[in-house]
Amino acid sequence: MNGNPRAVGVAGPNLTKVASRLSVAAGWLNHRAEDGSVDVEQQYANFYKWIKEPNTVKPGNLMWKANGGGIGELDELLTDDEIRKISLYLQTLK
């Protein structure tokens, strides 16, 4: 995340103001409401799916362990409740 000296990760997407975006996964998961705002229910569902199944959403992404890179399948590392909590947290990053 920009502006946070402790956030120096190299795997995964930039999370700066991620809750203000109308999509995630480089546009693969859209949560734009008809009025142009963010549909928060769809946004939560998209964050959850993006964390739980990153390679299903976008094959070869940086979160997935493509050719040994990335951090691996997060559903092997996190419980569903942890993914739920992370998804809710991401919705606060505006």
Image: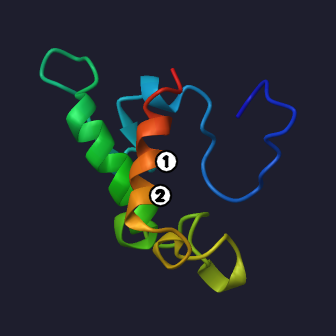
Way the structure is coloured: rainbow
Per the image, label 2 sits on a secondary structure element best described as: helix
Residue 26 appearing in the image:
no
User: Would residue 70 appear left or right of 4 to someone viewing this image?
Assistant: left
Vertical placement of residue 94 versus 67, above or below:
above
Residue 55 sits in quarter: bottom left
Q: Check the image and name the residue furthest to the right.
A: 5
Q: Residues within 10 Å of mark 2 (few under 14, many from 20)?
A: few
- Rendered location of residue 56, percent (x, y): 36, 72
Q: Residue at x 18, y 25 (%)?
A: 33
Single out the residue that lies furthest toward the front: 81
Q: Which residue is mark 2?
A: 82
- Between 73 and 32, which is closer to the camera in this rendering? 73
Report the residue that reaches farthest toward the left.
34
Neighbour tally class for label 1: few under 14, some 14-19, many 20 plus, Cα within 10 Å: some
> Can residue 78 be seen from the camera position used here?
yes
Identify the secondary structure beneath mark 1. helix
In the image, residue 58 above or below residue 41:
below
- Residue 15: x and y in percent read 60, 38
Give percent across and percent down for residue 18: 51, 32
Identify the residue at horizontal 22%, vertical 28% (top origin).
39
- At x 51%, y 79%, the residue is 76
Which amino acid, by three-letter code, is at mark 2?
A: Glu
Q: Which mark is residue 86?
A: 1
* Residue at 48 percent of width and 26 percent of height: 92
Amino acid identity at mark 1: Ile
Horizontal side of 54 relative to 2 (left or right) equals left
- Image quadrant holding the N terminus, namely top right
* Mark 1 vs 2: CB contact within 8 A: yes
Where does residue 49 sit, x and y in percent of width and height? 34, 58
